[in-house]
Image (cartoon, grey):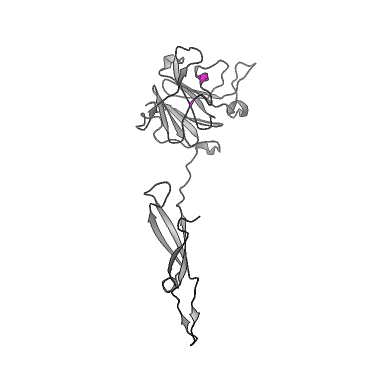
Amino acid sequence: MSLFPAITRPAAVAAGLSVAAATLIGCSSHDPAEEEIVYVTVTSTNPGKKSSSNKQVPQEEPSTVVVTVTEEQKPPQQIPGGDPDGIPPLSGAGGPKPPQARSATHIIPTANDVSKKMAAVQNADGTVVCGLFPDSTESGGRFFGCQIPTLMRTMKYGREEFPPSVRPPRWFVPATEGGTTEIVGVTDVPNSMNANPGNSQVINDGEVVTFGDNVCAGNHGGLTCWVIGSGHGADMADNYFRSF
């Protein structure tokens, strides 16, 4: 539906016009200051009637002006490697704590030691779930640990070679004190395993949550998490992992 369903003008003014363009400010539902190109098609619906002398007499009845608003199309953000499951890199990831970051609110015990605490967070649909620790001593040298359960089924990033009798699929993402991340298969129970979908704080796109030296931000349906100031972290989404 057009933002401007009908505008009327006298036929004498509208006649002879075809297509015009104008720029409107403040018509976007996304940003009040965003410019949109508006293509205006003007057509006369009343050509007038003939008088007794067979001359065309313009009528003062209004004609219809059809206005179509077309938002400017922005180029899509590039996904590293062109992975169809991927999310784009997040500006500022790996750096200092963003000023809009808020403290984590869902604090629970770790899986292996109830005396130790962690923050449990997840993306909107629960396909990425992370446990954030206040420091590496809480988690055996890990600053955060994230689960991407879909990868246990798809095995997109392969399996571990050991133990040979199990060869677990790679689905768990730990971050060390230096912020470096990798995707690994685990046979033990990580401390962060108490973070589960539905039992974790939801981080929607554009939201940023911090706990200890960790930051997780909602990014195109997934999560981008990093250790503050390390320059390292991970982009994660359903069936997707990328270390940076």
The overriding secondary structure of the stretch rendered in magenta is loop
Q: Is residue 10 magenta?
A: no
Would residue 244 be visible to someone looking at this image?
no
Q: Nearer the viewer, residue 156 or 62?
A: 62
In x, y percent, where is residue 159?
Answer: 60, 23
Residue 139 sits above or below residue 148 on the image: above
**Which residue is pictured at 40% across the width and 36% down the height?**
91
Quadrant where the image shows the C terminus: top left
Would residue 173 be visible to someone looking at this image?
yes
In x, y percent, where is residue 160?
Answer: 59, 21
Kindly give the residue lying farthest to the bottom in the view shown. 53
Residue 164, located in which quarter of the rendered image? top right
Residue 16 sits above or below residue 66 on the image: below
**Which residue is pictured at 39% across the width and 50% down the height?**
34
Kindly give the residue lying farthest to the right in the view shown. 165
In x, y percent, where is residue 138?
Answer: 44, 15
**Which residue is pictured at 62% across the width and 29% down the height?**
154
Q: Nearer the viewer, residue 44 or 51?
A: 51
Left or right position of 9 against 194: left
Q: Is residue 202 magenta?
A: yes
Residue 15 sits above or below residue 29 on the image: below
Residue 84, located in which quarter of the rendered image? top right
Marks counted in the figure total: 0
Q: Which residues are magenta?
A: 192-206
Q: Nearer the viewer, residue 161 or 14?
A: 14
Kindly give the residue lying farthest to the left in the view shown. 99
